[in-house]
Image (spheres, rainbow, N blue to C red):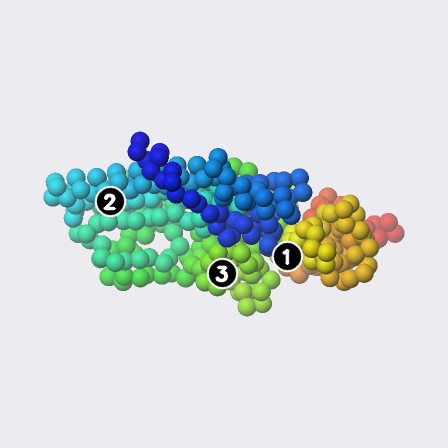
């Protein structure tokens, strides 16, 4: 008390990105686990689910957000008490005060709560540093930094020479103190790349630089977010012609980081580094009758005849439709042995890669079929 009931009369709406993700409008990435996993997943039941979260007096969502805002207010008040104490002691100008966190809170953005996602609301955290005696007022650093940079940065601000103390080998991060102490109020290194990984479940790994984020995962094609054009992280720019230089730069850095053990990511059963030509869309099917169905419903609640009646569905669901997709993909796939290979490289490989990898057969169907025919002959 009083924070546990401070916001009991405040009503919270689900963010637009959350509603769109839950309704698959468009569908979220495959590595994004939604808060709701309904048997049918969509339609009126999902709309009702959203309405219940927002309007029901006993909604767990309302209580969750009320408690969360209460905890934030508790932290805010106590940080204020700390700052007031430093001021009363006359130590506020020469004391380094750091406010940060280990993760964000999704708050139902993109259909999820808590953490564990590469989206900004989960992965982006504050690093607020107050040190009036040395840091220019109003400084905002745009360079991408990571939590591994915190320790060497703060120690350097404190004047601790950790190299001579034999501590350098324990830090993988870099010192941001140069940016913090410089006279430049808005330093920005557009080329610095940082990494983030789902260490718990291994669903995704990402490489980020100022304004851009490239993500690979076990259950989906790669994603590239352009935060300059799309701050809500809805659009996948991985196949955008104007984004290929950025994508290739982040892709190369991420693969090198994984293979050099700079970050740990279990590749598992291969990972798409570029978009496969033959991969079903995760979005709602554009059915004329308005039913909210997806590719996996074809052959069950949706007739397979739609694949033959309209090329839209054949292109929408190339894996599910009976007419099998046979177009090799451009780009590369990261194999479980750590090799990033294109279909042309797989075609001339001495190893039978296709038979051991379903994803490779999806990525390079034409090459794998030719290899199979050659082995039979």
- Quadrant in the picture for residue 274: bottom right
C-alpha separation, residue under disc 2 versus residue under disc 1: 45 Å
Name the residue tied to disc 1: 275
Q: Secondary structure at mark 3?
A: loop
In the visual, does 61 lie left or right of 267?
A: left
Q: Quadrant of the N terminus?
A: top left
- Label 1: few (<14), some or many (≥20) within 10 Å? some
- From this viewpoint, is residue 137 visible? yes
- Label 2: few (<14), some or many (≥20) within 10 Å? some
* Rendered view: 295 above or below 170: below
- From this viewpoint, is residue 29 visible? no
Quick one: which residue is furthest to the bottom in this view?
242
Q: State yes or no: discs 3 and 2 in contact (Cβ < 8 Å).
A: no
Label 3 vs 2, first from the N-terminus? 2
Label 3 vs 1, first from the N-terminus? 3
Q: Position of residue 307 (x, y in %)?
A: 79, 57
Residue placed most toward the observer, 20 or 130: 20
Q: Secondary structure at mark 1?
A: loop
Residue 230 - label: 3
Q: Position of residue 332 (x, y in %)?
A: 63, 56
- Quadrant in the picture for residue 315: bottom right
Q: Please name which of the two marks, 3 or 1, marks the residue nearer to the observer.
A: 3
Q: State yes or no: discs 3 and 1 in contact (Cβ < 8 Å).
A: no
Name the residue tied to disc 2: 97
């Amino acid at each position: 008390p009083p924070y546990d009931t401070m916001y009991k009369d405040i009503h919270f709406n689900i963010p637009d990105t959350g509603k769109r993700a839950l309704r698959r409008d468009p569908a979220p990435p495959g590595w994004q686990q939604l808060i709701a996993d309904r048997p049918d997943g969509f339609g009126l039941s999902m709309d009702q689910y959203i309405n219940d979260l927002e309007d029901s007096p006993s909604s767990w969502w309302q209580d969750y957000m009320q408690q969360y805002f209460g905890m934030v207010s508790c932290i805010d008040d106590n940080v204020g008490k700390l700052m007031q104490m430093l001021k009363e002691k006359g130590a506020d100008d020469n004391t380094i005060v750091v406010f940060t966190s280990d993760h964000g809170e999704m708050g139902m953005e993109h259909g999820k709560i808590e953490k564990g996602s590469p989206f900004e609301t989960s992965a982006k955290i504050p690093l607020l540093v107050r040190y009036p005696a040395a840091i220019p007022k109003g400084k905002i650093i745009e360079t991408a930094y990571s939590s591994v940079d915190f320790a060497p940065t703060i120690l350097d601000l404190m004047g601790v020479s950790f190299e001579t103390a034999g501590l350098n080998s324990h830090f993988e991060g870099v010192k941001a103190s140069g940016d913090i102490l410089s006279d430049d109020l808005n330093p920005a290194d557009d080329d610095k790349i940082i990494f983030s990984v789902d260490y718990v479940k291994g669903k995704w790994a990402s490489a980020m630089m100022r304004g851009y984020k490239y993500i690979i995962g076990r259950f989906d094609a790669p994603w590239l977010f352009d935060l300059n054009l799309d701050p809500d992280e809805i659009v996948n720019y991985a196949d955008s012609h104007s984004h290929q230089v950025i994508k290739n730069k982040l892709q190369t850095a991420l693969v090198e980081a994984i293979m050099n053990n700079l970050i740990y990511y279990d590749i598992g059963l291969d990972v798409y580094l570029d978009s496969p030509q033959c991969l079903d869309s995760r979005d709602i099917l554009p059915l004329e009758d308005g039913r909210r169905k997806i590719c996996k419903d074809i052959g069950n609640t949706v007739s397979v005849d739609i694949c033959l009646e309209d090329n839209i569905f054949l292109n929408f669901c190339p894996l599910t439709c009976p007419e099998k997709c046979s177009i090799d993909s451009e780009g590369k796939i990261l194999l479980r042995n750590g090799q990033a290979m294109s279909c042309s490289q797989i075609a001339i490989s001495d190893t039978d890669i296709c038979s051991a990898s379903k994803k490779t057969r999806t990525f390079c169907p034409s090459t794998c079929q030719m290899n199979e025919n050659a082995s039979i002959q």
